Amino acid sequence: ETGVTQSPTHLIKTRGQQVTLRCSSQSGHNTVSWYQQALGQGPQFIFQYYREEENGRGNFPPRFSGLQFPNYSSELNVNALELDDSALYLCASSLSAGAQLSQYFGPGTRLLVL
Amino acid sequence: AQRVTQPEKLLSVFKGAPVELKCNYSYSGSPELFWYVQYSRQRLQLLLRHISRESIKGFTADLNKGETSFHLKKPFAQEEDSAMYYCALFNAGGTSYGKLTFGQGTILTVHP
């Protein structure tokens, strides 16, 4: 059983560019959540995907969008990058949506916007 | 709006001493709470969740609905407990369904 993996590990972009981050969920998990973690802060929920549909969304603008594929892997896309988007982006997967099912986190992608 | 507060950013204890990491929450429904831990250079991982009423690595946490708290405790701290600890609250309704709301975290340092 493999854990949650994310790619790339690090990324540098310039303001105004677009970025795509990828996440492979743990084997057997159909739910993926994305979080943004700024330096010195706890993770902030961006959105969750369950069986290829967006299942819940936090307070992030529409330029943050996502996809989930039939194999339950997921992408986070951010358009028109801003300096404040610099952060660690975490992906978490779970067996299904629901509080009783624990979320397992990936190692994160560190994004720097210059 | 739901909120999780961890009032201590840093906590230092000596090995063998008791430790308590504080967590208070604000939530209108029935809360589902978790503690996550991040050891140095490792990913965020689940430590325990209140619905399981389990003890992991000697840590326990009791949900106190009256005080809206979910403090993490361990009677005898070990050096390997040094890490960042996050308290998190699950949102089971509305447009933010599936959301874990995290506190800002407490860095625990256990001195030899």
Image (cartoon, coloured by chain):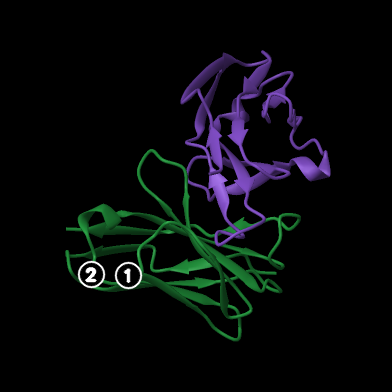
| Quadrant assignment, res B67 | top right
The x and y percentages for residue A57 are 50, 63
> In the drawing, what numbered circle is on residue A80?
2
- Residue B89's quadrant in the figure? top right
Residue B112 showing in the rendered view: no
Q: Quadrant of residue A50?
A: bottom right
Colour in which chain A is drawn = green
* Residue B50 pos. (x, y %): 76, 40
Please give the residue where the numbered disc 1 appears in the rendered image: A63
Residue drawn where x is 60% and y is 29% of the image: B23
Chain at numbered mark 1: A
Q: In the depicted view, which residue is nearer to us: A27 or B106?
A: B106
Rendered residue at 45%/74% (across/down): A66
Looking at the rendered structure, which numbered label has been put on residue A39? none
Secondary structure at badge 1 equals: loop
Which residue is drawn at the image coordinates 57% and 78% (left, top)? A53
Determine contact: label 2, label 1, CB under 8 Å.
yes
Q: Does any portion of residue A100 appear in the rendered image?
A: yes
Q: Output the letter for the chain in purple.
A: B
Question: Three-letter amino acid code at disc 1?
Answer: Arg
Q: Are the residues under badges 2 and 1 in a single subunit?
A: yes
Q: Earlier in the sequence, mark 2 or mark 1?
A: 1
